[in-house]
């Protein structure tokens, strides 16, 4: 039978919220200069790992980001059309010039999804859902199907820990009993992988079992 690995799309619940660890993306695409998002292993203050685009001084506008900026993408199955508010657990890196990202849907930055602003007075990770120009961050989903949530670098150096989507405008992650990190990450749909092993490679069933366990662990 095929392996079923938890690396497929995220499934947005009809009620409640969807939580994604930023490093668990489905796709990473480099920018026009070859720079891409990298993982910060066990970054201080993050819930686990975090992601960042290294560099200094770069700023990419909403108009230019889809074609020029480094992108992370997350496949999400939405149960219904509507407005989804976006929260990002992030910090401003080394300075106030490293404190923002863009979000969007299916390769497009919507009117209210760009310029997500970190708390630039602090280098601690905090949940943010405000644009640098003011107002909440949200996307409009037009139909109940699978879509691609995109995250683009606006300013290099901004560090991203987690993402959260909800249709509840009043919900604030980190203010409830789950703690400052927010709720646990949501489950992903399994991806099926077909594979064939050559039985002549193994000395006995124990050798096969050991190899199979390493294979599954490496693909998960």
Image (cartoon, rainbow, N blue to C red):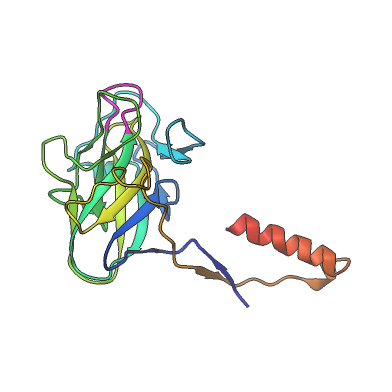
Where does the magenta region start and end?
91-99
Residue pushed farthest right? 203
Q: Nearer the viewer, residue 135 or 113?
A: 135
Residue at the far front: name it. 177
Residue 97 placement, left or right of 160: left
Choose top left, top right, bottom left or bottom right for residue 4: bottom right
Q: Quadrant of residue 11?
A: bottom left
178 with respect to 110 (left or right): right
User: Which residue does the image show at 88% across and 66% down from the upper left?
Assistant: 203
Chief secondary structure of the magenta portion: loop
User: Tag count in the figure?
Assistant: 0
- Above or below 155: residue 183: below
Residue 96 part of the magenta segment: yes
Residue 126 in the figure: left or right of residue 46: left
Residue 193, given in percent of the width and then of the height, sits at: 57, 69
Is there any visible trace of residue 172 in the rendered image? yes
Q: Which residue appears at 48% of the width and 41% of the height?
A: 48
Q: Nearer the viewer, residue 186 or 147?
A: 186
| Quadrant holding the N terminus | bottom right
Task: Report which quarter residue 168 is drawn in.
Answer: bottom left
Q: Position of residue 146 (x, y in %)?
A: 31, 68
x, y percent for residue 133? 11, 36
x, y percentage for residue 176? 31, 46
Q: Is residue 184 on the magenta stretch?
A: no
Q: Quadrant of the C terminus?
A: bottom right
Res. 35 visible in picture: no
């Amino acid at each position: 039978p095929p392996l079923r690995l938890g690396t497929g799309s995220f499934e947005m619940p009809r009620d409640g919220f969807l939580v994604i660890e930023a490093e668990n993306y489905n796709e990473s695409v480099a920018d026009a200069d070859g720079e891409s998002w990298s993982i910060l292993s066990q970054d201080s203050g993050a819930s686990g790992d975090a992601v960042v685009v290294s560099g200094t001084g770069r700023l990419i506008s909403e108009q230019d980001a889809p074609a020029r900026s480094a992108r992370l993408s997350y496949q999400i199955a939405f149960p219904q059309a509507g407005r989804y508010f976006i929260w990002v657990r992030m910090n401003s890196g080394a300075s106030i010039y490293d404190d923002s990202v863009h979000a969007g849907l299916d390769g497009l930055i919507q009117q209210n999804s760009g310029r997500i602003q970190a708390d630039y007075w602090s280098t601690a990770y905090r949940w943010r859902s405000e644009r640098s120009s003011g107002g909440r961050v949200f996307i409009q989903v037009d139909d109940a199907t699978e879509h691609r949530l995109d995250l683009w670098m606006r300013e290099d150096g901004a560090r991203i820990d987690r993402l959260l989507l909800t249709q509840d405008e009043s919900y604030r992650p980190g203010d409830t009993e789950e703690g400052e990190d927010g709720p646990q990450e949501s489950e992903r749909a399994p991806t099926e992988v077909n594979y064939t092993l050559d039985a002549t490679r193994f000395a006995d069933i124990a050798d096969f079992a050991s190899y199979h366990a390493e294979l599954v662990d490496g693909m998960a």
